Image (cartoon, rainbow, N blue to C red):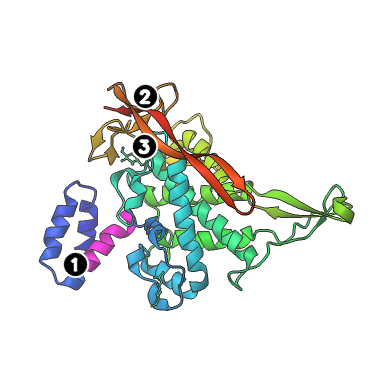
Amino acid sequence: MTTRLRRRNTRRNTWIYVNMLALSCSPFLRLALIVLLCADRCAAVKWLALHRIKQKTWENARNCSKMYGLIPRQVKICKQNLDLMATVARASHVSVETCQNQFSDRRWNCSSITNVPSLPKDLVRGTREQSYVYAIASSALVHSIARACSIGVTTKCSCGALPSSSPSTGFKWGGCGDDVHFGLFFAEVFTEAVLTSKKGKPKTSKRALTNKHNFRAGRQIVTDSLTTACKCHGVSGSCSIKTCWKALPDFDIIGAKLKDRYSLAVEVHRKRRKKEKVLVPINEAKSGIRSDELVYYTKSPDYCSPDHKTGSIGTHARLCDEQSYGPGGCDTMCCGRGFHSFTMDVAERCECKYYWCCYVKCKTCVKTLHLSQCR
Ligand SMILES: *[C@@H]1O[C@H](CO)[C@@H](O)[C@H](O)[C@H]1NC(C)=O
Ligand SMILES: *[C@@H]1O[C@H](CO)[C@@H](O)[C@H](O)[C@H]1NC(C)=O
């Protein structure tokens, strides 16, 4: 029965069908049906639901709940790594925030991500936007875990290993670098838990292969972003002794790099090569897919008007910039529907003065903002 159901899954009315069927089943069977159907389709970044968590304490195994969008395999990882879960939650928070900042002046502005664990259509159909979200989630995980290692939140990892190559000019390796190695390992295990079948085999659907590639691209970007940070020692900062270590940049920089990858994302389809199923670029002139490239298999809509089928919410009432011809400019943002301009007064603290000792006194100034909003 379940295989038949799964096949029907590709058809549009499946959910109604399943729900009707499920209603007539026992509660247990009902849950099992929904979990089965959903496992492949919607679970891969559900754990971003952790971004809502404010509490920092993960002290007992009961905290690892499906409520936070974790699948059973991740619940198990959670129970074994309670000391890292606040960091995982932090990574989901950083993913959501960075995605929304990077896309704040785009028609698609990453607002749908906050619906997790329920994923809207724009994040399940295999679009470019989905590829960005998957990559940012996995890179945030690597980044946060690697940092957490170097500040000592867990005993599972500590400072990153020092590079084996000897430094070229006048410094020695030392200090405490971010443990990217452990970050990569943890992120891979945690994210790919979802892309593995119950029996432990990797899933090979087009969706699973694509999600897997984008998770990997996210990890790759972090590795490629490692820089060398140094500190000087010696008499009054003379820098006669310098120690250096490998450190990660702020996550904003990684978010921006991924946005470049998003613009250059490669459209792919799945092909059988010998016994393996692999993704290949639609454009035959392109020879292969690099590990730091994002891939997608469904063309995105223009996100101009609301469309239930694609998950577009449209740009009605979005703020736009009348002066700009870029993506946030009113012409592009409002898709030619036009816009209306208005002014708004906002109060601001200004002309602040410091008085000895110790207070600051400010005046309140009213500033008039000129804003435009899409029709
Ligand atoms: C974990 O459980 C404890 C007590 O049961 C609770 O105080 C805490 O808020 C929980 N943390 C999370 C993240 O749910
Ligand atoms: C994104 O756009 C929608 C409407 O299109 C708007 O309601 C929402 O506030 C925007 N979100 C952000 C984070 O800018």
Label 1 neighbour load within 10 Å: few <14, some 14-19, many 20+: some
Q: Is residue 34 magenta?
A: yes
Residue 370 sits in quarter = top left
Residue 123's place in the image compared with 196, above or below, is above
Q: Residues within 10 Å of mark 3 (few under 14, many from 20)?
A: many
The residue mark sitting in front, 1 or 2, is 2
Helix, strand or loop under label 1: helix
Assign the N terminus to one quadrant of the image.
bottom left
Q: Earlier in the sequence, mark 1 or mark 2?
A: 1
Q: Nearer the viewer's eye, disc 1 or disc 3? A: 3
Which mark, by number, is residue 30? 1
Q: In the rendered image, which quarter is residue 116 located in? A: bottom left
Under mark 3, the amino acid is Trp
**Residue interval drawn in magenta:** 31-42
Residue 9 percent coordinates (x, y): 23, 52
- The mark total stands at 3
The answer to whether residue 167 is visible is yes
**Tag 1 near tag 2, CB within 8 Å:** no
Disc 2 marks which residue? 330
Secondary structure state at the residue bearing disc 3: loop
Q: Position of residue 349 (x, y in %)?
A: 48, 41
Answer with the quadrant where ligand 2 appears in the image: top left
Residue type at numbered disc 1: Arg
Magenta segment includes 109: no
Identity of the residue drawn at 45% across and 48% down: 97
Closer to us: 56 or 50: 56
Quarter in which the C terminus is drawn: top left
Q: Identify the residue at image location x=33%, y=57%.
A: 117
Residue at 46% in and 70% down? 77
Q: Please provide percent x and percent y for residue 320.
A: 37, 29
The alpha-carbon separation of the residues under discs 3 and 2 comes to 14 Å
* Residue holding disc 3: 108
